[in-house]
Amino acid sequence: MRYRPFGKAGMAISAVTLRLADHPRMSGKDWRNLIFTALEAGINSFEVHGSSNALLEGVSESLTTIERRLLFVGWRLRSGGELLSAQAIHDLVDTAVERCGLSYVDLVTVDDPGSAFPPTAMAALVGLRQSGLIRSLGLASRGESQDRHLAGGMFDALAAPFNLSSGWADRHRIRNAMAHDVAVIGEDFWPQSIREREAKPIFKKPSLWRRRTDPLTNLGGYDFLDNTTGWTGQELCLGYALTEPSLATVQVITTKRDKLEALAAVVERDLPTGCAAQIEMARFSAEQAAGTKRRA
């Protein structure tokens, strides 16, 4: 495993973060074993996205066995479309500290409300950070309001999507966060659009109207994700996200221990020769296809 500095906090966290989200088939023992697998692979960064009894039991039984200062444990506070409340914030911290025995939360990440945050919620976050129960505050954003929230200096981290199909908007969002001295957490490295794609070129055989000399004719899509020897498509996507130096860490989601071990091992691997060029060609093809569709 490799480690990167996390923003102004200065702590070195693993290049891969394990996101822990509620799962109906996972018991407390299952969660405990999964977290121990992550720890054995060198992962010291976790983010809790759930509140089920099984998940909290697994977190408590595993992470409390490690010296607290060696771990970076975050919590995602989702609003569910409702206004963020001070009570929800206090309940989250109580769960992490009292029920899971973590003594404090390294990072609490809240969803971007688009408009202004409720004053009572912000006061609660500031108060808990001043008390030391929360070390850092993060913003999960994919919208234009991100710039306004980050400019206020309230947030220490930004959780944003980054993957091999990321365009100008995603990259600009990351650059803007870096300009505000905000750590960036990469999400959605294995996007649904790529998971569900058909493994075939974006452009098929040239139609009658396309010139045979058209430079786009032989450009393919993301089919190389399915036929690169020694790599799965998911591993290639993670490997690409890890090449972005602006990301403090990249979140992975899995409940399978063997898959987690394979993903953690990607950190020490170099992308295959020519893979970067294939990614750029695929992105160019996708942009051209999207432009053609808009003009149709």
Image (tube, helix red, strand yellow):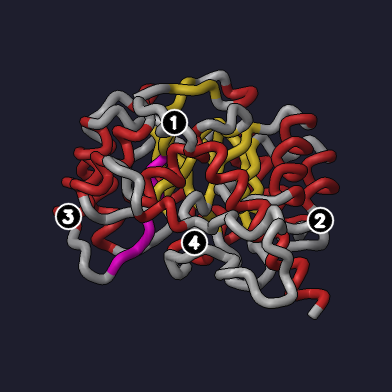
Residue 116: x %, y % from top left: 82, 58
User: Which residues are drawn in magenta?
Assistant: 17-23
Pair 2/4: label in front:
4
**Residue under numbered circle 1:** 273
Residue at image x 58%, y 23%? 9
Local SS, label 3? helix
- Tell me the SS state at disc 1: loop
Looking at the image, do the residues carrying marks 2 and 4 touch, with CB atoms under 8 Å apart?
Answer: no
Q: Residue at x 76, y 60 (%)?
A: 118
Quadrant location of the C terminus?
bottom right
Q: Residue at x 38, y 59 (%)?
A: 21
Residue underneath mark 3: 30
Indicate which disc, 3 or 4, sits on the residue closer to the N terminus: 3
Quick one: label 3 or label 1, which is nearer the N terminus? Answer: 3
The residue where tag 4 is placed is 194
Q: Nearer the viewer, mark 3 or mark 4?
A: 4
- Work out how far the residue at label 2 is from the one at label 4, CA to CA, in angstroms: 24 Å
Toward the viewer: 229 or 255? 229
Q: Amino acid at mark 4?
A: Ile
